[in-house]
Amino acid sequence: MSPEFATRYNRWRYNLYAPVYDRVVAAFFAPRRRRAIELLAPAPDERLLLLGAGTGLDLDYLSGCRQLTAIDVSDGMLARLRRRADRLGLAVDVRVMDGQRLDFPDACFDAVILHLILAVIPDPVACLREVERVLKPGGRAVVFDKFLPDGGHAGWARVAANWLTRLIATDINRQLGVIVGHTTLHIEHEESAGMGGFFRIALLRK
């Protein structure tokens, strides 16, 4: 599957998922989202990018932030994000945009949130390189997602399961260290986020 086709497929399927997305994932992931944002510790005046922002579930933990930008390939998801931002009284610059090709100048963000996106986006290396580009020197990014342990190998059952999970939602065999290794970002902190380390939270810094 080409990256272009995969991006169009992601747009289609997440527009399809949008009406039920919050009911399916909100409760389970809420503590992990909150923990990741605590590690990021965004200051009120920092410029913050939510990449792959979905329906805006992270906004519940960003009430003190005044310079928020949210992007996603799914306009259906972003329509719900706009309504959530209105309910929370948050001003958010919302844009339909491909996380592999950010339409922002270099070094324009203080921090980036990447929640449940690096295992979904067709080219996670291109995505993280774009994050590296738009971050200011010393800027940071927080990642929350599912990863195969660095240096580990997927067994046959996990390889087989990945055929299904990739079709429905996500790749479960990507390795964070491998992705980060294609950039100059470094992992400042990493911790388990549940299911025996299947989910991870990592703080990256430029």
Image: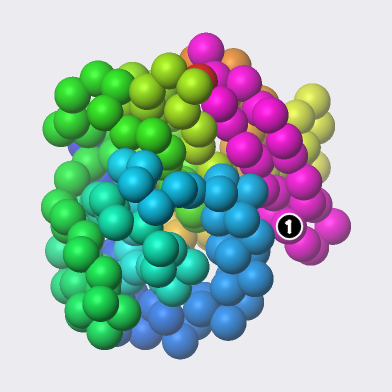
Residue sitting at x 48%, y 42%: 118
Q: Residue at x 77, y 46 (%)?
A: 191
Quadrant position of the N terminus in the picture: top left
Q: Residue furthest right?
A: 196
Q: Residue at x 73, y 39 (%)?
A: 190
Whether residue 144 can be seen here = no
Where is residue 2? Give x, y as percent. 28, 33
Write down the residue under mark 1: 193
Q: Is residue 34 above or below residue 102?
A: below
Residue under the image location 42 percent in, 80 percent down: 22
Our reading of the magenta stretch's main secondary structure is strand
Identify which residue, 194 or 191, lies in the foreground. 191
Residue 132 position in % (x across, y down): 41, 22
The image position of residue 116, as x and y in percent, is 50, 54
Give, as a single range, the part of the protein colored magenta.
184-205
Q: Is residue 186 visible?
A: yes
> Does the stretch in magenta take in 204?
yes
Determine which quarter of the picture holds residue 106. top left
